[in-house]
Amino acid sequence: MGTINYNTNELVYNVREDDTLSSRVALVICVLVPRGLLIAGFSITKELLTMHYKGYNKNKPVWELDFFEHLLANEPILAIKEKIKGVFICSDKNLIVPYELYMEDEAKNWLKHIHFIEANDVITPYFLMDEKANYLHAVPLNITELIKINFKHAEILPLAIYQFRNPHKQPLHLQCCLSNEQVCLTLHNNSQLLWHRVFNYTSAEDIAYTINLYCQENDIDQTQLGVMCTGLSSAEYERINELTQYYPGIKAGNGHAITSSWGPAISLANQLFACVS
């Protein structure tokens, strides 16, 4: 394969400066978003050791197969395939159906009515135990096949899956996960699922507008929202910081204060790892 130039943005987090850190990575998860890939490495004792994020600019198509194929084949942390325990994918083409109402063919037809599902998209359902519902999402077939070829033993799950595990028992709890161009939002009220949406954004104002519009339409006082944010890398910190002008009490996804630019990404990696460990 020839040289690939995507004008990539590369960011690396290490828990400490240690030349032997990579050799201690025993467990790995990956997160794929339309123009980016996060790889997180953990020790055998499940301590987060390192995160590598690479993304490319919007002048290239989403889900560019060569970009992901090149990274999955050449990233040193991914060399030993048995270490990869989970691969998470973010898609804005999704639908949640209560389990007692779920019929696979009908659910897929509804998804096609709501979203534009391309001929080469594959629709996959996932059971949400805590919600007693099925989560369907659509992802390009060539991406899912690439993952299966590279990581035969890894679980493949929606990125949003962590937002439905053990919902916090508190009123109006909004979980927010940001990538370089998408945001994944899930709102619970005392463990009751109220709202879930994944969409593209260009500014923090876009995100706040969408949240506030939902609140207005459903008679929810937006000032009562408890907002917890995660991100794929330190690059999302600026957007999360901008969101604090709308929601001053924002915390990281683990409920702790955000004390560093990598804090939201560290929280995300740990929450996703809990889904496959």
Image (cartoon, rainbow, N blue to C red):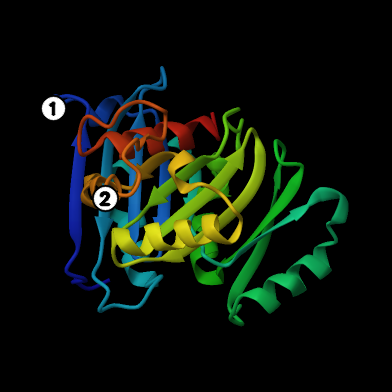
Nearer the observer, 21 or 258 = 258
Task: Choose top left, top right, bottom left or bottom right for residue 218.
Answer: bottom right
Q: Residue at x 49, y 65 (%)?
A: 143
Residue 101 horizontal/vertical position (percent): 86, 56
Q: Residue at x 36, y 64 (%)?
A: 206
Residue 88 horizontal/vertical position (percent): 49, 49
Q: Residue at x 62, y 38 (%)?
A: 189
Q: Quadrant of the C terminus?
A: top right
* Identity, as a three-letter code, of the amino acid under mark 1: Asp
Can you identify the residue that label 1 sits on?
Answer: 19
Q: Is residue 211 left or right of residue 247?
A: right
* For residue 86, above or below residue 184: above
Q: Residue at x 41, y 70 (%)?
A: 63
Q: Which mark is residue 155?
A: none
Instruction: Decide if residue 152 is in sight here.
Output: no
In this view, the residue farthest toward the bottom is 119
Q: Residues within 10 Å of mark 1 (few under 14, many from 20)?
A: few
Q: Quadrant of the N terminus?
A: bottom left
Q: Nearer the viewer, mark 1 or mark 2?
A: 2
Residue 2 horizontal/vertical position (percent): 22, 73
* Identity, as a three-letter code, of the amino acid under mark 2: Glu
Q: Is residue 277 left or right of residue 236?
A: right
* Callouts 1 and 2 close, C-beta under 8 Å: no
Q: What element does badge 2 sit on?
A: helix
First in sequence: mark 1 vs mark 2: 1
Nearer the observer, 29 or 207 = 207
Task: Choose top left, top right, bottom left or bottom right for residue 171.
Answer: top right
Q: Is residue 49 left or right of residue 154?
A: left
Q: Which mark is residue 236?
A: 2
Q: Residues within 10 Å of mark 2 (few under 14, many from 20)?
A: many
Nearer the observer, 238 or 67 = 238
Residue 9 horizontal/vertical position (percent): 18, 59
